[in-house]
Image (tube, rainbow, N blue to C red):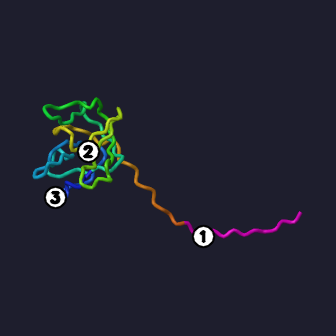
């Protein structure tokens, strides 16, 4: 996260052991994650970030909230070929994928693990191989 619709909201990157809260940001219809201490700053997740929710995750419904049936999730991007849609989503341990903007507000989750940084591309120095003839 941070999705395209949060360009007007201040943000920071998630850190291991952060306790996040699902929230709705003022002036937007977008939901995301913030810290309890700073509900106006979006906490951005990178694809592969693992979260553990305190309770069974709930998503907003037309009339009432529904349960996802899981507490462990991995952040990922979906529908990246559709530029005007939300891309931030959570893939839960039970295989269900839920867009972050569909989460019910007020749910708490701890950042368990951040994705590994991509390996730095190394440029190898040219190797010179010298072949010598051996005598029998």
In the rendered image, residue 15 lying in the magenta stretch gets the answer no
Indicate whether residue 131 is drawn in magenta. Answer: yes
Q: Rate crowding at label 2 as few (under 14), some (14 to 19) or many (20 or more) other CA atoms within 10 Å.
A: some
Distance from Cα at disc 3 to Cα at disc 2: 23 Å
Which mark is on residue 45? none
Q: Is residue 25 above or below residue 105?
A: below
Q: Is residue 72 above or below residue 76?
A: above
Magenta part of the chain: 124-136
Nearer to us in this view, 64 or 10: 64
What is the quadrant of residue 59 in the picture? Answer: top left
Q: Earlier in the sequence, mark 1 or mark 3?
A: 3
Residue at image mark 1: 126
- CA–CA distance in space, label 1 to label 3: 48 Å
Mark 3 Cα shell of 10 Å, populated few (<14), some (14-19), many (≥20)? few
Q: Nearer the viewer, mark 1 or mark 3?
A: 3
Write down the residue under mark 3: 8
- Separation of disc 1 and disc 2 at Cα? 45 Å
Nearer the N terminus, badge 1 or badge 2? 2
Question: Residue 86: percent from the left, percent from the top?
Answer: 24, 49
Magenta span: predominant SS is: loop
- Residue 18 is tagged as 2
**In the rendered image of this protein, does residue 115 appear above or below residue 110?**
below
Which of disc 2 and disc 3 is earlier in sequence?
3
Q: Indicate the secondary structure of the residue bearing disc 2.
A: loop
């Amino acid at each position: 996260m941070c999705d395209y619709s949060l360009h007007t909201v201040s943000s920071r990157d998630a850190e291991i052991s952060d306790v996040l809260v699902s929230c709705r940001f003022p002036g937007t219809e977008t939901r995301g994650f913030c810290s309890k201490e700073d509900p106006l700053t979006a906490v951005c997740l990178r694809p592969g970030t693992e979260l553990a929710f305190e309770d069974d995750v709930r998503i907003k419904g037309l009339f009432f909230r529904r349960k996802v049936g899981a507490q462990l999730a991995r952040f990922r991007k979906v529908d990246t070929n559709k530029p005007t849609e939300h891309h931030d989503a959570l893939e839960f341990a039970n295989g269900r994928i839920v867009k972050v903007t569909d989460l019910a507000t007020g749910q708490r989750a701890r950042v368990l693990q951040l994705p590994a940084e991509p390996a730095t591309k190394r440029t190898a120095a040219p190797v010179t191989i010298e072949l010598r003839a051996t005598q029998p």
